[in-house]
Image (cartoon, rainbow, N blue to C red):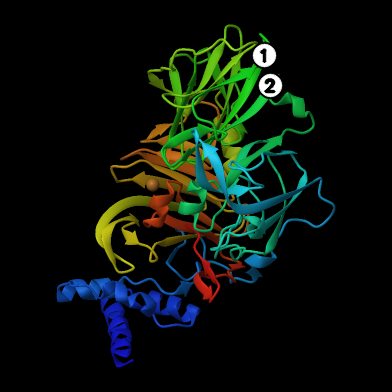
Amino acid sequence: MLGRGVVVVAAIIAVTLTGLGPALATAAQVGGAPAAVHRANACARVHGDRQHQQCLASLMPRSYSMMAMGVPDLGGGAPMKRPTTSLASLHGPTGTPAHSFSLVAAMGEQVIDGGPRAVMTFNGATPGPTLTVTQGDLVEVALTNQDIARGVTIHWHGVDVPGAEDGVAGVTQNAVLPGETHIYRFVVPDAGTYWYHSHQDAVDQVAQGLLGALVVLPRPDPAAASLATEDKVAVIHTYGTSTTINGLTGSQFVAVPVGTTMRARFVNADNGPALITASAPFRVAAIDGTDVPGATDLQDTYVLVPAGGRADLLVTVGEPVRIGMLSGPSWVLAPSDPGPLPELGAHAQFDALSYGQPGTGAQAAAEFGRPQRRFTYRIGQTTGFLDGQQDEWFTINSRLIPYVPMFVVHLGDVVSVEIDNETNLPHPMHLHGHHALVVSRNGVPSTGAPWIVDSLQVAAHERYVLTFVADNPGIWMWHCHNLPHARSGLMTHLMYDTVREPYLVGRVSAGLTNRPE
Ligand SMILES: [Cu+2]
């Protein structure tokens, strides 16, 4: 007991000495426990004196509020109002839903690439069922956790749902434990291709298959999903070392008549980029759920779909067409099975910065206006201690989690953000609850159709300027969708000044630990 007490005191002293003390102390008090003493053993290794101090200082609190974890960044804007609205009150509307779905999360086994594999499933399969709805519909989803010990959630990736429906454990809800059911309700505001996945223990649960596609057809005419006469979802996901489309490796024959125009809705549910192309001329009809006006035919070109991102490709079948990943799974579209087709090859990378019919400057200005807040999201890397572990960690504006900037906005603000990747790795950056317009890349302005994203590949040493309207109150994760990167510190959030946070990340009770990543 004495030894444990000494460690507690040492931890508090070490924390105070680093200058990070106040924030961590605040965070620790939120959890009602001294600073992460449960992890002190992680520090009980052989360090030099100074290293040991750093190690102790790096221990994460046992639990903390996302609102208190970091350093508020007001983006140079006006002072803020007081938080008066609980995030837990920001639910979707009541009323009779147009669609009611039931998703049961469970441990399972599925044949992948010819052999049985332990997976996590929705309704007995991975990917889970494709949910197809119509724009403007009220959707209700009952999530039941059958037997996933650590609990689950569902995040509606790319859908701008109300704050309490975003499905992030410890941020917008508690993880749903085995035997529990949680109801999500939201109106789908925009047509397009989206997906859903667990945001509890996401690194493991997404990898193991807790994911599926969500397709929102346009209203009033669902058939007007561009010029397509066929419409099919292609969820790309790698199980272990087997990369699949809809759970299947290799080349799959899809029977379609000659003259068919296929809208292939690619969803990248992996941690790395997916490179997709077709053996015939194709168009990029939509990116991250937003249609691209004036899309033109592409050849010898591949599309890089970032982790978490989506791209809808349109291709017309004359000769048999192969469409899918460069050196990966694909479909062969033809009236009858033509047998194997040549591997896909393409030389040029598609660039959305200059593709499609340009939006006018006036249009963009009318839509987005002059920014009230300007943020910098600068991604770096450092060697150091985090939670008692010495490793290479990601930093945001030179800060290590949890002391990262928290980007604070007021409802209605027009926001400008520069994402600056100073690392040697690409980062697929995902902002929850909002869509952003790409303004420029490395100082080169966007000249194509308005390029609107929720998941943006920011390559090594690239710099993007984005703009968006803060029109959806809540607390919204803003993180790298290479999920191991998020767990290694590339994770913060956008928060609204008026919104209070009732949930805690970390250990909430004996049976419940919220781990968003
Ligand atoms: Cu990353």
Comes first in the chain, label 1 or label 2: 2
Check the image and report above or below for 21 versus 195. Answer: below
State if disc 2 and disc 1 touch (CB < 8 Å): yes
Q: Is mark 2 within 8 Å of ligand 1?
A: no
Image coordinates of residue 155 in percent, x first then y, are: 59, 52
Residue at far front of view: 115
Q: Give the crowd class for mark 1: few <14, some 14-19, many >=20 residues within 10 Å.
A: some
C-alpha separation, residue under disc 1 versus residue under disc 2: 7 Å
Name which residue lies at 48% across and 82% down: 32
Name which residue lies at 19% across and 71% down: 51
Q: Amino acid at mark 2?
A: Glu
Any part of residue 370 in sight: no
Any part of residue 143 in sight: yes
Q: Amino acid at mark 1?
A: Thr
Image coordinates of residue 287 in percent, x first then y, are: 55, 32
Q: Is residue 342 left or right of residue 463?
A: right
Image coordinates of residue 206 in percent, x first then y, are: 51, 48
Residue at far left of view: 48
Taking depth in this image into account, of 207 and 364 the one nearest to the observer is 207
Check the image and report above or below for 234 versus 453. Answer: above
Question: Where, by quadrant of the figure, is residue 489 drawn?
Answer: bottom left
Q: Quadrant of the N terminus?
A: bottom left
Residue annotated with mark 1: 260
Q: Is mark 1 within 8 Å of ligand 1?
A: no
Image coordinates of residue 378 in percent, x first then y, are: 36, 51
Question: Where, by quadrant of the figure, is residue 350 drawn?
Answer: top left
Mark identifier at residue 230: 2
Name which residue lies at 32% across and 89% down: 5
Q: Secondary structure at mark 1?
A: loop
Q: Secondary structure at mark 2?
A: strand
Residue at far bottom of view: 2
